[in-house]
Image (cartoon, grey):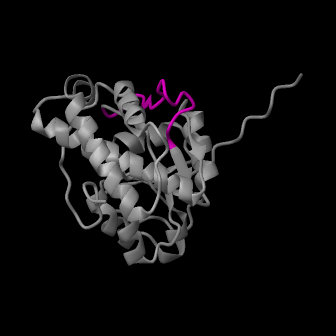
Amino acid sequence: MAAAAKTAVQPAVVVGGGRVGQALLSMGPPGADVLVGRGEKVPEDAPGPILVCTRNDDLDAVLDATPRSRWRDLVFFQNGMLDPWFESKGLVDANQVLAYFAVSKLGEPPVDGITDTNPEGLTAAFGNWAPAVATRLQNGGLTCKVLEKEAFQKQMLEKLIWISAFMLVGARHPGATVGAVEKEYQSEVASLIAELASAAAEERGLTFDAGIEERLCAYSRAVAHFPTAVKEASPAYHKLSI
């Protein structure tokens, strides 16, 4: 039986040459991607999606550097709850990726968020460019599922809760990695997860699937080496708010 043809990875513009940006470049077709660095303009005629891998507090500058005709091609890899910022910019149904993978150092391969509770992987993409992004990530050996908006937003809130809970508890215990928080301060982080999940469910009018604490702790074990920190605060970075 003939093997199924492999889907080609579409060329893209990658904004941001940090850890995630370089990892995404390594997954693309050799020599076909365009890297846009700080202060540079996003080309109007480059094909494919525009993968935005900057810090959240750089997003206004990225938007200013992108021709308005290309805004629909922007794909945001940022953590946090960006909906208020999207709404303020008129970015309805913006392409987004929940990156449940970690790149510890520049040039190192990403560690996928495959866990014992979610062996299919947790990374997800939403929007018109979601299938192309999923193909790129899968080409790099990562998992990625394409979700509709409601399912994506629920998972986005879970990721926000994970960041908020584990980074805050880690900040209380300087030097603690994500794995140390899960192992040594589990009662603290479990209490915070429950509190944030309850507030998020009430505010957004949704019900999380059972086992949210187990899922988030399992992901922490998968990226146990990752450091904890609370380091950004900007109007675009709703990291600690529901």
User: Which residue is at 51% across, 72% downward?
Assistant: 92
Where 115 falls versus 30 (above or below)? above
Please state the horizontal and vertical placement of residue 146, each as a whole percent of the image: 61, 48
Residue range highlighted in magenta: 105-123
Please state the horizontal and vertical placement of residue 38, each as a whole percent of the image: 30, 58
User: Which residue is at 30% across, 54% downward?
Assistant: 55
Q: Horizontally, is 26 left or right of 53 in the view? A: right
Q: Residue furthest right?
A: 1
Quarter location, residue 105: top left
Quarter location, residue 199: bottom left
Residue 88 visible in the snapshot: yes
Please state the horizontal and vertical placement of residue 140, each as a whole percent of the image: 54, 33
Q: Main secondary structure of the magenta part?
A: loop
Residue 163 visible in the snapshot: no
State the residue in front, 163 or 74.
163
Please state the horizontal and vertical placement of residue 193, each as a whole percent of the image: 30, 43
Where 193 falls versus 84 (above or below)? above
User: Which residue is at 41% across, 39% downward?
Assistant: 212
